[in-house]
Image (cartoon, rainbow, N blue to C red):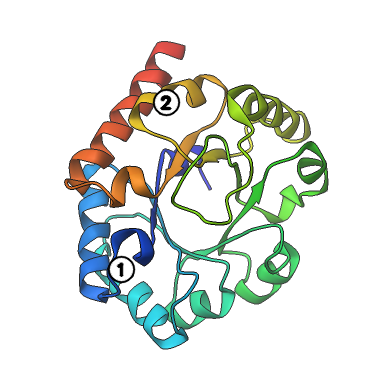
Amino acid sequence: MKNDVLKVYGIVDPAVMQTRSAEALAGAAVKAVRGGATLLQYRDKTGGTREMIEAVRAIRAAVAGSGVPVLVNDRVGIALAAGAEGVHVGQDDMAPEDARRLLGSNAIIGLSIKTEAEVDAAPLDLLDYVCIGAVFATTSKADANAPIGLEGCRTLVERIRKRIPDFPVGAISGITAQSAGSLIRAGVDGVAVISEIFANGDIEAAARALADAVDAAVHNAS
């Protein structure tokens, strides 16, 4: 996977959007892509299996032709059934090795990391990217970890890149258009957000603001 796929990583969460309508979730995803989202994830911690499959299928159909991959948080079975492009797993979810075995070599598989020990243990050769976080405090995730901050993020990026230079790395949690640039300067390739896009009254404009912030930081660094 190319590093720039992580540029604006929009996470569609029914709890944040306060709707379980597959049509509404798909419509929101389309607006995010129009604004500049380069990767989408469906994250649903309480939904039923059938409604989750329906939602992922609707999102994939809505953004078909855009080139934006759709991943599923944690639920490998949902990803398989809905035909998603891959999954994102956490430290307590299915092991990346098992996800790769089930989904195959072409699937996109990402992993959350937050400590140096997790960086060292991560099977980077089986992963397409990692996401560092929680970077900043957030209200979008009830299970969010204590934030590691900008310097903590920078330290983990450097540790990852010592293992594999240019390995795709994103950052997640509490990120806004105002803080996105600082994270790009800390070495990440992109930012993963929930509320900053999907709790916004203008989803397309919010995604565009993030994309512009990332572009500006990349341009200024070059």
Q: Do callouts 1 and 2 mark residues in contact (Cβ within 8 Å)?
A: no
Q: Secondary structure at mark 2?
A: helix
Residue 46 vertical placement versus 112 (above, below): below
Residue 89 percent coordinates (x, y): 62, 61
Q: In the drawing, does residue 84 fall left or right of residue 133? A: left
Residue farthest along the bottom direction in this orientation: 50
Residue 12 percent coordinates (x, y): 37, 59
* Residue 222 visible to an observer of this rendering: no
In front of the other: label 1 or label 2?
Answer: 2
Residue placed at 62% from the left, 32% from the top? Answer: 166
Residue picked out by circle 1: 59
Residue 103 vertical placement versus 88 (above, below): below
> Which numbered disc flags the more N-terminal residue, 1 or 2?
1
Q: Amino acid at mark 2?
A: Ser
Tell me where residue 62 sits by quadrant: bottom left
Q: Secondary structure at mark 1?
A: helix
Residue placed at 42% from the left, 28% from the top? Answer: 180
Tell me how far mark 1 sits from mark 2, CA to CA.
28 Å
Neighbourhood count class around disc 1 (C-alpha, 10 Å): few under 14, some 14–19, many 20 upward: many
Residue 86 percent coordinates (x, y): 52, 65
Residue picked out by circle 2: 179
Residue placed at 65% from the left, 76% from the top? Answer: 102
* Residue 54 visible to an observer of this rendering: yes
Q: Amino acid at mark 1?
A: Ile
